[in-house]
Image: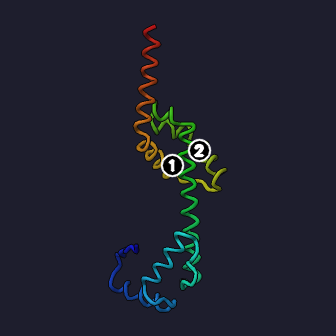
């Protein structure tokens, strides 16, 4: 099933885009966008598909690789946090976990992915982790509280 997309550009930009598509040998702007989408998604074009100019193709291929690297960094972050920082997040919050583990996380991500995320990405990923694991964090915190209460009663 084919999907449609929309672009928010001016009428003048629309005409320029049509000219560029034609100059590059594309039958339509749809073919141009399809080629661009394939470069972004797969890092290469489908067999027999017309290609954008070398600079555009190169930039789209770089964006594809960047996207793969960001996915690697985010997945690695989630694994590291789950393995090491879940108790800290549950008991003290994401700000404390970020301060305690931030630099170590960067080093581990670099070792696994060859790239280092921005601090803003790390903050965002901490919030995402907290939202995805909210029930688990609450359960952990409640178990710890119950264990502390049981210890006080003895």
Q: Residue furthest right?
A: 111
Name the mark on residue 122. Answer: 1
Q: Secondary structure at mark 1?
A: helix
Q: Where, by quadrant of the figure, is residue 104 drawn?
A: top right
Q: Name the spot of residue 116 as percent of width and height, x first.
A: 60, 54
| Residue beneath the point at 46% across and 44% down | 129
| Residue beneath the point at 57% across and 53% down | 73
Q: Are marks 2 and 1 in contact (CB under 8 Å)?
A: yes
Q: Where, by quadrant of the figure, is residue 132 drawn?
A: top left
Name the mark on residue 80. Answer: none
Q: Residue furthest front?
A: 1
Q: Name the spot of residue 136 as percent of width and height, x first.
A: 44, 35
Answer with left or right where residue 139 lies relative to residue 80. left
Q: Name the spot of residue 135 as percent of width and height, x first.
A: 40, 36
Name the mark on residue 105. Answer: 2
Q: Is residue 86 above or below residue 35?
A: above
Q: Secondary structure at mark 2?
A: helix
Question: From the image, which quarter does the N terminus lie in?
Answer: bottom left
Q: Name the spot of residue 72 as percent of width and height, x first.
A: 57, 55
Answer with left or right where residue 108 lies relative to residue 94. right
Q: How is the image coloured?
A: rainbow
């Amino acid at each position: 099933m084919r999907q449609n997309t929309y672009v928010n550009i001016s009428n003048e930009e629309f005409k320029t885009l049509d000219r560029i598509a034609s100059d590059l040998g594309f039958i339509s702007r749809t073919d141009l966008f399809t080629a661009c989408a394939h470069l972004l998604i797969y890092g290469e074009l489908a067999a027999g598909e017309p290609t954008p100019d070398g600079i555009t193709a190169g930039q789209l291929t770089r964006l594809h690789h960047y996207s793969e690297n960001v996915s690697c960094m985010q997945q690695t972050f989630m694994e590291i946090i789950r393995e090491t920082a879940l108790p800290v997040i549950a008991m003290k919050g994401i700000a404390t976990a970020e301060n305690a583990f931030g630099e170590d996380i960067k080093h581990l991500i670099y070792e696994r992915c060859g790239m280092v995320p921005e601090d803003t990405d790390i903050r965002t990923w901490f919030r995402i982790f907290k939202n995805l694991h909210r029930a688990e964090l609450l359960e952990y915190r409640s178990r710890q509280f119950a264990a502390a209460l049981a210890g006080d009663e003895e």
